[in-house]
Image (cartoon, rainbow, N blue to C red):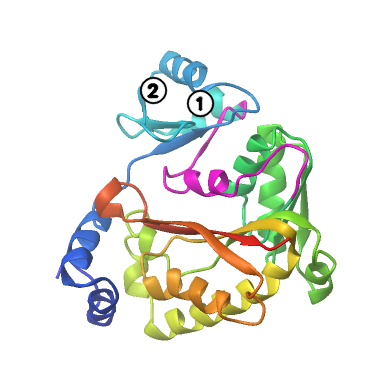
Amino acid sequence: RESVPDWLDEMGVKELGEEVWEKEIHALNQQAPVVLRTNTLKTTREKLQQELQKEGIETEFIKGYPDALQLKERANVFKTEAFKNGFFEVQDASSQLVAEFLEVEPGMRVVDTCAGAGGKTLHLAALMDNKGQLIATDIYANKLKELKRRARRAGAHNIEPRAIDSSKVVKKLYGSADRVLIDAPCSGLGVLSRNPDAKWKLQPEFIETIKQTQEEILKTYSKMVKDGGKMVYATCSVLPSENQEQVEKFLNSEEGKNFSLKEEKKILSSETGYDGFYMALLEKQK
């Protein structure tokens, strides 16, 4: 079938069923569109569209994605003045739904626990209007350096990067956050159209290991949420075993017993034309 390793094909069929998997793999073998997220700290989507047009780049709005612009044809947007001025980030439309899903408000204390180079952190900062405290943690300190650079360009001032170099960093945050985002490490099956080679590098053992990691991360990082607070668990995978099954397992665990599932989104590339994603909004009892 459409150039996927046999073991992955079997896993996909087992988890999603023949029909859905067939469509999904087909969609993920198409070239991904280039989508931008307007940095609302600095401009509006309409103004950005005009700026880019002046530089010869044509874009269109995407219905249902309030800050998104999609390129009509591929171009190197990183050379534009608009980019240098921090007016936008390149971010897939599905990925742009995650920060919104967390229901942040200006003035809150928010932790982005697997921040990486900070695509979603920057979006959270914009949604918080630079007000409040946004702590960005990651086990890779070098990724946070990149986040600092991007935050400067974006004019996002409320971000505080903290490398997780010991368990103390995480423990200090227990019970203190209004909102927590867990953009968990995953198989990346939802973003194959961006990384076509990834499927040949993936190993079944890796997926098993990553599921263990997801389970541990959920149990540990959820302790940062204060009573009455909310948390989003998200992945760029389409496999139920990395998504709703992890959430279910968490809710049935000792660590998850005070949480309830408010809403979840399962985004398939074959249905939207954008990356495959999953997100669950969980609330902790007061």
Q: Residue 12 falls in which quadrant of the image?
A: bottom left
From the viewer's side, name the closer residue of 214 and 192: 214
Q: Are marks 2 and 1 in contact (CB under 8 Å)?
A: yes
Real-space CA distance between mark 2 and mark 1, rounded to the nearest whole angstrom: 9 Å
Badge 1 marks a residue whose secondary structure is loop
Q: Is residue 108 magenta?
A: yes
Q: Is residue 172 left or right of residue 76?
A: right
Badge 2 marks a residue whose secondary structure is loop
Residue found 68% across the figure and 65% down from its top: 140
Q: Is residue 31 visible?
A: no
Name the quarter where the C terminus is drawn.
bottom right
Q: Position of residue 105 (x, y in %)?
A: 69, 39
> Disc 1 designates what residue?
80
Residue found 42% across the figure and 34% down from its top: 76
Over which residues does the magenta segment extend? 85-109
Q: Identity of the amino acid at label 2?
A: Ile
Q: Position of residue 2 (x, y in %)?
A: 16, 66
Of the image marks 2 and 1, the number of the one nearer the N terminus: 2
Mark 1, residues whose alpha carbon is within 10 Å: few (<14), some, or many (≥20)?
Answer: some
> Disc 2 designates what residue?
57
Name above or below for residue 252 compared with residue 263: below
Name the quarter where the N terminus is drawn.
bottom left
Mark 2, residues whose alpha carbon is within 10 Å: few (<14), some, or many (≥20)?
Answer: some
Residue found 58% across the figure and 27% down from its top: 87
Q: Position of residue 79 (x, y in %)?
A: 50, 30
Q: Identity of the amino acid at label 1?
A: Thr
Q: Position of residue 54 (x, y in %)?
A: 44, 13
Q: Is residue 77 left or right of residue 19?
A: right
Q: Is residue 259 visible?
A: yes
